[in-house]
Image: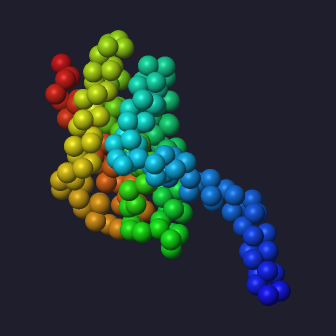
Amino acid sequence: NYRTVRFYRKKRRDCSSLHCDVGRKVKGLSTFYFIGKMSPIPGTLGSLIGLIVGIFLLYYSSLSIFLSFLILLFIISYISISLYTSDPKRSGHDPAEVIIDEFLGQLISMIPIFTLAQGIRSLLIYGLISFILFRFFDIVKPWPISYFDNMKNPLGVVLDDILAGIISALILFFLFSE
């Protein structure tokens, strides 16, 4: 049918615009370009990637660069999750394949390591402890984390992991600071 062919061509042409291309790339960020779809444990994988990137940033950068990266990552996370969850083909308010929020939360849990670590060995040990603490709070979701998880919107998707990261960071700091 000529009309059907014309409709698909028009739709395809519209979607090849710069706006659609940028939208696809930003949506891809929320799943780390589909790494979140390939794993049976996507949240843990996102946190593990955060741990690896965090160790690199802790070792090679300053606290101000680390915090600036977190602010930029929060903005990117919110936008990409908003775009991803607005797609009617996606199910739920917090799809399991969306792992950028776990990545962000894991990095937040590592902030105290700037004051605690005194070498690569202690950096790795504190990094592992922050990973365990963050995964615990991200999975169990005690109050007030559960409050944000129940918000059922993109901001809640990001804030529950941010709060899990903050609580993990506070526990890490108070357990090991002198």
Q: Is residue 164 left or right of residue 63?
A: left
Q: Quadrant of residue 12?
A: bottom right
> Looking at the image, is 5 positioned above or below residue 26?
below
Q: Which quadrant would the N terminus be assigned to in this image?
A: bottom right
Q: Residue 73: percent from the left, percent from the top? A: 49, 44
Q: Which quadrant would the C terminus be assigned to in this image?
A: top left
| Front residue of 42 and 59 | 42
Q: Residue 123: percent from the left, percent from the top? A: 33, 19
> Looking at the image, is 122 positioned above or below residue 89?
above
Number of marks in the image? 0
Residue drawn at x 27%, y 48% as measured from the top left: 138
| Front residue of 87 and 35 | 35
Asked whether the viewer can see residue 74, the reply is no
| Outermost front residue | 1
Q: Residue 100: percent from the left, percent from the top? A: 45, 48
Residue drawn at x 38%, y 36% as measured from the top left: 48
Residue drawn at x 46%, y 52% as measured from the top left: 37
Asked whether the viewer can see residue 85, the reply is yes
Residue drawn at x 48%, y 58% as measured from the top left: 81
Q: Residue 170: percent from the left, percent from the top? A: 23, 36
| Front residue of 115 and 120 | 120
